[in-house]
Image: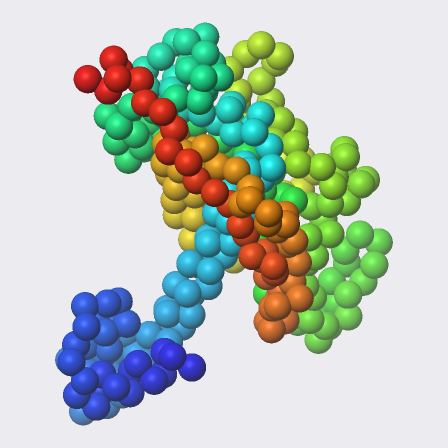
């Protein structure tokens, strides 16, 4: 595909563009020697593997961002609660004043939005975390994890998986299983809010029902933290400055895997995600 073609062009003397693929190939060519004729640090195989990983991470992160925008457009009440949280933790308002500002639909001041890039502020957006987790549960970007190969007979849940069997985990099915989740087909961010009624939201750090959108264990997705932190920043930046609504005359996004050619299956908006963004009014006194 595009990665081997890019490597061949760079090796053939094409101008060096300042992108991650070009710099990896540059290092590969610079580190060739009699003892390492194909190059090393990184090898060509490592270069290709790294790029596949980067592209996969970007694709699934984009799917995750799309899902939350669609859900926000469908649920103005959820969008208002996100805005209230942003006014409180980024805009410096009391919880009551933040709720009032969100009810009026005013934007978070620009100075407050710059606080998004401070991790200690980002980590306080507990309700937005609940929204993210519910998006990942209901429409997890990857429907299953990469196959695992059993090298010996393995007992699991009363069954024995024979040696030589390839096993895949059904993330989509597990996240919607009625035995473990109440009203599993509904979008309900509060299922991840463990705070008592009336208290500030507090996102659950662990879901006993079994939530593993990035797989789990030692071989889980290495980009999970990056994807989640980028998602929080992106949604905060959008919902804090814009009102997100459904595109006029456009249907709701249908999330499915029918356009996915990969065996693992990726959930995406197969008919497109059509939303409109309108700039929120600003409070001149707070912008000063």
Q: Residue at x 61, y 60 (%)?
A: 270
Where does the image place residue 60, in percent across and percent down from the top left?
50, 56
Q: Is residue 264 above or below residue 286?
A: below
User: Where, by quadrant of the figure, is residue 182 drawn?
Assistant: top right
* Near-viewer residue (288 or 82): 288
With respect to residue 274, does 46 lie above or below?
Answer: below
Answer yes or no: is residue 27 visible.
Answer: no
Quadrant of the drawing holding the N terminus: bottom left
Residue 155 lies left or right of residue 59; in this view the side is right
Looking at the image, residue 167 sits to the left or right of residue 202; the answer is right
Whole-percent x and y of residue 54?
39, 63
Is residue 217 depicted above or below 24 in this figure?
above
Instruction: Pick the residue in front: 131 or 280.
Output: 280
Q: Residue furthest front?
A: 249
Residue 271: quadrant of the picture: bottom right
Could you tell me which quadrant the C terminus lies in? top left
Q: How is the image coloured?
A: rainbow
Q: Is residue 257 left or right of residue 132?
A: right
Give the residue at the far right of this rendering. 158
| Residue 84, image x, y percentages | 45, 20
- Tell me which residue sits at (63%, 47%) in the image: 252
Residue found at x 26% / y 67%: 20
Residue at 42% across / 36% down in the picture?
A: 278
Number of numbered discs overlaid on the protein picture? 0
Q: Is residue 275 above or below residue 34?
A: above
Question: Is residue 168 in sight in this rendering?
Answer: yes
Percent x, y of residue 235: 43, 38
């Amino acid at each position: 595909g595009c990665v081997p073609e890019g490597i061949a062009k760079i090796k053939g003397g094409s101008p060096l563009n300042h992108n991650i693929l070009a710099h990896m190939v540059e290092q590969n060519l610079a580190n060739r020697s009699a003892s390492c004729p194909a190059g090393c640090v990184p090898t060509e195989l490592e270069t290709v593997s790294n790029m596949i990983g980067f592209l996969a991470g970007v694709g699934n992160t984009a799917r995750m961002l799309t899902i939350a925008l669609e859900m926000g457009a469908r649920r103005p009440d959820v969008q208002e609660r996100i805005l209230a949280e942003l006014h409180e933790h980024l805009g410096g308002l009391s919880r009551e004043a933040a709720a009032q500002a969100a009810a009026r639909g005013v934007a978070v001041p620009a100075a407050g939005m710059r606080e998004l890039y401070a991790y200690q502020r980002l980590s306080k957006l507990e309700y937005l975390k609940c929204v993210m987790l519910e998006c990942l549960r209901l429409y997890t970007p990857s429907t299953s994890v990469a196959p695992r190969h059993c090298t010996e007979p393995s007992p699991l849940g009363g069954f024995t998986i024979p040696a030589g069997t390839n096993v895949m985990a059904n993330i989509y099915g597990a996240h919607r299983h009625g035995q473990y989740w109440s009203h599993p087909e509904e979008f309900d961010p509060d299922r991840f809010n463990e705070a008592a009624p009336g208290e500030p939201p507090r996102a659950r750090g662990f879901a006993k029902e079994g939530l593993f959108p990035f797989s789990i264990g030692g071989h889980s997705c290495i980009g999970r933290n990056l994807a989640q932190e980028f998602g929080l920043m992106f949604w905060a930046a959008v919902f804090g400055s814009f009102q997100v609504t459904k595109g006029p005359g456009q249907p709701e996004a249908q999330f499915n895997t029918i356009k996915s050619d990969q065996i693992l299956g990726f959930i995406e908006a197969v008919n497109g995600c059509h939303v409109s963004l309108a700039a929120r009014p600003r409070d001149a006194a707070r912008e000063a």
